[in-house]
Amino acid sequence: MNKLKVLVTTTSFQDTPGKHHGLLAEQNWDLTFLRGPLKEQEIISVIDQFDAVICGDDEYTQKVLEKGVNGKLKILSKYGVGLDKIDLEAAKKFGVKVTNCPGINQNSVAEHVFALLLSFEKNIHIQHNSVQQYSWKRQIGHEVFGKTIGIIGFGAIGKEVARIAQAFNQKILIFDPYVKSEGINYFNAQKVEDLTTLFNESNYITLHTPLNPETKHLINQEAINNHLTKKPVIINTARAGLVEKEAVINGIENNKIGGYLCDVLDQEPISKNEKLVGLNNVIITPHVGSRTYENVVNQGIAAIKNTIEFLIT
């Protein structure tokens, strides 16, 4: 019997030793490793060789999926949560199973939200670089205690952000039309029925929704010009497309936004032409919110188990 051919493209899975490697080695699979995220032209030439892919944010377009099912492809097991790089309609049309790991990375990502926020408000990044030059020029920071945080999207990560925000005695506003108020009250939070209210009242706005046509450019020029009355700091550890980048840049330059702290960019890895680089009041990290040792292992095991469960049925 021929071994099942499985491709692994996620780099954090590959680069981090742990129990997920042991579980993968226990499977009687013919394994291939490529370093993603892979573009359409990179993946399309090999996709038909594999029964399954344990994938990161590779581009699984209709063309890629059609090529895959004309070969051996049966399942894309997403190592992580976001599925916006996969054409889900095409996957359904061609009968390719798509799985992910919901509820797996909330601790790591929520901690990263506050790591970014505290670094920014305390000027940690600026002061660290200054001291490396033997400077002792001290800046005035800000407390996050008692401020108002607006959380857009109240899934597993949004809930964990709210739990941490309670420790800072923050007023918590939630916008999520798919979550009932009862589930929000547990966190001593307030559900708002429209984004305008959240925009107007928040010192901090943090984004935790999937990227889809409904959520694309939630933060846009109209919102920045008319509704960000408290000049908030915006934190984006979800997807770059949730914000209109040019509007954010204009908002920072025109003092409408206090800061933009992001772990995601439109083009990853980063392009030499990235306009956010070098702007004051912007912190960028290279999509590492979920990249903790604990979470890599947990996500890896979950993605492997999803693959096993599908392939043995």
Image (cartoon, rainbow, N blue to C red):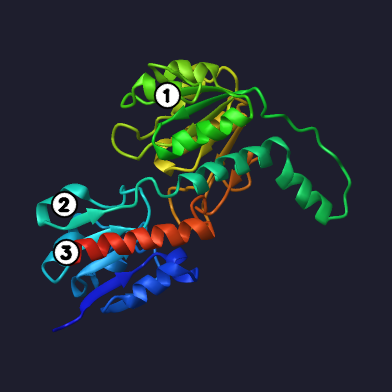
Q: Which residue occupies 64% across, 29% down?
A: 168
Bin the neighbour count of mark 1 within 10 Å (Cα to Cα): few under 14, some 14-19, many 20 and up: some
What residue sits right under mark 1 in the picture? 184
| Separation (CA) of disc 1 from disc 3 | 39 Å
Q: Which residue occupies 44% across, 17% down?
A: 196
Q: Position of residue 276 (x, y in %)?
A: 56, 44
- Residue 59, disc: none
Q: Position of residue 201 (x, y in %)?
A: 54, 17
Can residue 132 be seen?
A: yes
- Residue 90, disc: 2
Mark 3: which amino acid?
A: Lys
Bin the neighbour count of mark 2 within 10 Å (Cα to Cα): few under 14, some 14-19, many 20 and up: some
Mark 1: which amino acid?
A: Ile
Secondary structure under tag 3 reads loop
User: In the displayed structure, would residue 146 be above or below residue 69?
Assistant: above
Mark 2: which amino acid?
A: Ala
Secondary structure under tag 1 reads helix
Tell me the quadrant of the picture where the N terminus can be found. bottom left
Q: Which residue occupies 37% across, 26% down?
A: 176
Task: Give the mark nearest the N terminus, 2 or 1.
Answer: 2
Left or right placement of residue 134 versus residue 121 in this view: right
Quarter of the image where one finds residue 309: bottom left
Task: Give the mark nearest the N terminus, 2 or 3.
Answer: 3
